[in-house]
Image: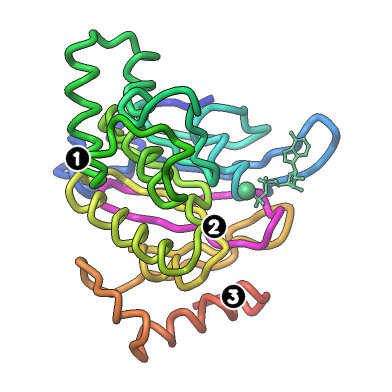
Amino acid sequence: MTAPVSSASSGRPADTAAGGPGTVGLRFEGVSKVFPDGTRALDDVTFDVRKGEFVTIVGPSGCGKSTVLKIASGLIPETSGRVELSDPNIGYVFQDATLLQWRTVQRNVELFCELHKMGKEERVERAAAAVRLVGLDGFEGHYPNALSGGMRMRVSLARSLTLNPEIFLFDEPFGALDEITRERMNDEVLRLFRIERFAGLFITHSIYEAVYLSTRVLVMSARPGHIVAEFDVPFEYPRRPELRFEPAFAELSGQVSHALRGGYGP
Ligand SMILES: Nc1ncnc2c1ncn2[C@@H]1O[C@H](COP(=O)(O)OP(=O)(O)O)[C@@H](O)[C@H]1O
Ligand SMILES: [Mg+2]
């Protein structure tokens, strides 16, 4: 079960306990997951994501990354260990944009507000603001099948933004996009991160995407997933696309790659 994070259990200084930067948004403590068929997906996973942080988990396919996010969001229960969430207001973006084909962009973006039984006026207003935020103004009346993959992902992002999430979970959202679009979407997410100040937990296969986006990269082992290494990313925001070609970026990416291949340790 998820439980609120109290300032006492966060272990952080008192001046960061009121919800500002540094407060724990999400904490996993010794979390393991065994599915009913006996599949051991996670083994003793411990990490936290503080407000103002953008944490990325990289790990091989099938190691339990999606399972971490499903447990974090309360979609499925952990088998043992403890999960703490400071605020139930989370955003969740999947690899597939999961849009309703029969609804326009505007109506797709209104969906979560509708599910939260928000009044029409507020819903329309929030959706319009989110559409602007992701740069889709002018496309409000379009249907999903008339949009590119990148634009569909923007709709998916906007839909989550309408609820002003404190914690944003991303499950390989750009894995199916071409490289150029993916890099653009990375900048888009960082722009939103800097405006909205959510705590981000991002899952990816891509070492470069992980290093480019994050304040911290966690490396997961093959199943059962376990955090085997952690890297602080020292680069300032806003990050420039050219950062990807700088020696310090290559060096850190190399260290993450080494850990992924089983060498562990920073
Ligand atoms: N409902 C389930 N029942 C049994 N096994 C599952 C279930 N969901 C996922 N798994 C297994 O758990 C492991 C981790 O899955 P997942 O978290 O989706 O991996 P990843 O996202 O890292 O690719 C995989 O071996 C997957 O087949
Ligand atoms: Mg997955």
The location of residue 220, given as percent across then percent down, is 60, 61
Range covered by the magenta-colored residues:
45-64
**Amino acid at the residue labelled 2:** Gly
Which residue sits at x=62%, y=72%? 260
> Foreground residue, 28 or 141?
141
User: Dot 3 corresponds to which residue?
Assistant: 259
Distance from disc 1 to disc 2, alpha carbons, whole Å, reads: 24 Å
Distance from disc 1 to disc 3, alpha carbons, whole Å, reads: 40 Å
> Foreground residue, 26 or 97?
97
Residue 17 lies within the magenta run:
no
Lower position in the chain sequence, tag 1 or tag 3: 1
The location of residue 15, given as percent across then percent down, is 14, 43
**Amino acid at the residue labelled 1:** Arg
Disc 2 secondary structure class: loop
User: Dot 2 corresponds to which residue?
Assistant: 175
User: Quick check: 20 above or below 159?
Assistant: below
Q: Is residue 90 left or right of residue 198?
A: right
